[in-house]
Amino acid sequence: MTYKETEFPQILEILAEYSKKGFPLEEIIMNLYKLYKDVPIYIGIVAMCLENLVKETKEKDIRKGDFIFLFDKNFIYQGEVKKIEMPNIYLKNVKVIVNKKNLKMKLKKQKLFKLEKNVLAKLWPSLYFKK
Amino acid sequence: MQKDFKKGVYIISGPNKIKLLSGKVISIAKNFELGEEIFIPEGKRIPLEIEVDSKIELSDEKLISFIQTSTIPEDWDRVVNYLIYEKINALIIFGEVDTGKTFFSTYLTNKLISNNLKPSVLDCDTGQSDIGPPSTLGIAIFNKPILFMTEVKPEKLYFVGSHSPSEHFLHYICGFTKLVNYGLKNSDIVIIDTPGWVLGDGGRMLRNSELEILSALETNYVVVLLQRNQEIEHLVKSIPQKKVIRLTVSKKASPTSVEERKKLREFVYKKYFSNIDTLELDFDKIFTDRVYFLTGQRLNKKGNLLWVEKLSGFEGLYVVSENKLSDREIEKVKKLYDVKKVKNVSKDEFKNVLVALLDQEGEFICLGIIKDIDFLKQKIYILYPKKYSVRNLKIIQFGSLKISPKIEESGFVEPGLL
């Protein structure tokens, strides 16, 4: 059997595409979650909506209340448009992601997490096949 | 009003009432009797083939259009002889949406009846059901010609739970098997009218599974492909080609928009639930199906919880509360009952859920809508069409659609939630 019994995997592919393009995924995932809760039995339609969730837009088409992603040279900004006074826009609930090739940081007992390497091999070794 | 019709083919749209006063008229292989009254429902259309100049009484003259040639493609007629000669006992129709699968089923039914056979039609289109309400598979057995599948009383129905087999594959396939089997035992040939989902993983898998079941049931089946070009050839690549009949799509077939489909479904639901009553059922006297609710071991409720059940093994605790519990409250419940997992449902999630009411044998009685659940009194209140006797009701089978008290589609329930 090679056909998929659910269209859920398609959603992972679309999320991976957004991530590859550099989009911070948090807001996209919350929108996806809402879409799924709205039409939980039509996963194909959820996936179709997800693909069309983020659209490139022009400055003149930005409205108050829009949620935007802005790609600058070294920063990615995301937030909700609070006010527009061209050429300035004011955002609220802003998150800024800084792109840096390298970074030196001082560790001083912050909350720290790390991604597990080979989590499949650790949790379910019989399903782990060396490539 | 009365109208004279010249020899030719006309399409009459509903709502319309027609009566043949003189002449000779055939529609979908059914001969009209003089004086016979036919009602064409809203959203439906029929072709009238006027054999000789005829006089017809009709309620709305504006809903007539003339077309040049017959709506029945020439190759359709040859199918009937083949079915009889080859002793075919199951015929499955594949085609994209709006390729006239139901129209072909009706035509074939009438032709087979005129050849003294007793056909049954299994309507698998859960979105645009003609036999039975939407979200069900329905089978009917025919002794006399018909114009609309909606005219007949279903012999048996099976609740799929949704307008689409999507996320309901297994229920769809169970219902398909059950009703094909019934048709094989009770008619000469089962005509299977399938949904228009023929592409992609889901479409391929469903159509492929249907063929495997027909084979497993040892039927002498054929597949009819209704296609405009070669758009569904992929569905029959691996089966013996003598089992495949390729037919032309009728000129009558025309697209129906998603909105129109929704309107038609709601129209059918409104008709189905037009005269309703409320059923009051004790938790102790019924069983639930396709949900976790009422399948575990009941526990005393603590705090402000409305209902608590212990499910088997890793499934944990099933908890109904007025509102969805916060993460903190869930942690408290885990400690209180000493469990690792809590499945929490808010009371309102049950409201307006479309259900099937079944008897002890699991046979469909009618559809119902959950009006309310009183967890204190341990009672379920269900709206149901009064005309059905629910004396033998034993099982409530849950679906994944919500229908509002105004009988309009009002959302979904996430599978596995309740």
Image (spheres, coloured by chain):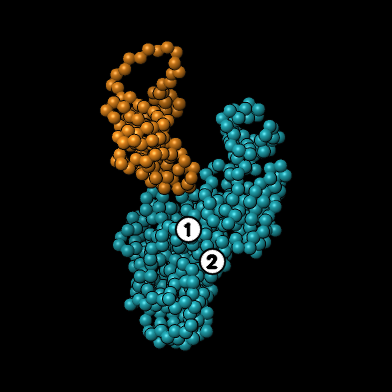
Chain colours: A orange, B cyan
Residue B169 locus on image (x, y percent):
48, 50
The quarter of the picture where residue B236 lies is bottom left
Residue farthest along the front direction in this orientation: A85
Answer with left or right where residue B22 lies relative to residue B329: left
Q: Residue at x 31, y 27 (%)?
A: A75
Residue A100 locus on image (x, y percent):
30, 22
Q: Nearer the viewer, residue B94 or B40?
A: B40
Instruction: Point out which mark residue B32 bears.
Output: none
Q: Residue at x 42, y 28 (%)?
A: A120
**C-alpha distance separating marks 2 and 1:** 24 Å
Q: Is residue A38 visible from the viewing direction of this image?
A: yes
The quarter of the picture where residue A68 lies is top left
The chain identifier of the residue carrying mark 1 reads B
Residue B133 locus on image (x, y percent):
54, 60
The quarter of the picture where residue A64 lies is top left
Mark 1 lies on a secondary structure that is: helix
Q: Amino acid at mark 1?
A: Lys
Residue B196 locus on image (x, y percent):
41, 58
Mark 2 or mark 1: name the one nearer the start of the chain: 2
Q: Which residue is mark 1?
A: B262
Q: Which residue is mark 2?
A: B140
Q: Amino acid at mark 2?
A: Ala
Answer with left or right where residue B393 lies relative to residue B118: right
Mark 2 lies on a secondary structure that is: strand
Answer with left or right where residue B364 lies relative to residue B194: right
The chain identifier of the residue carrying mark 2 reads B
Q: Residue at x 43, y 40 (%)?
A: A32
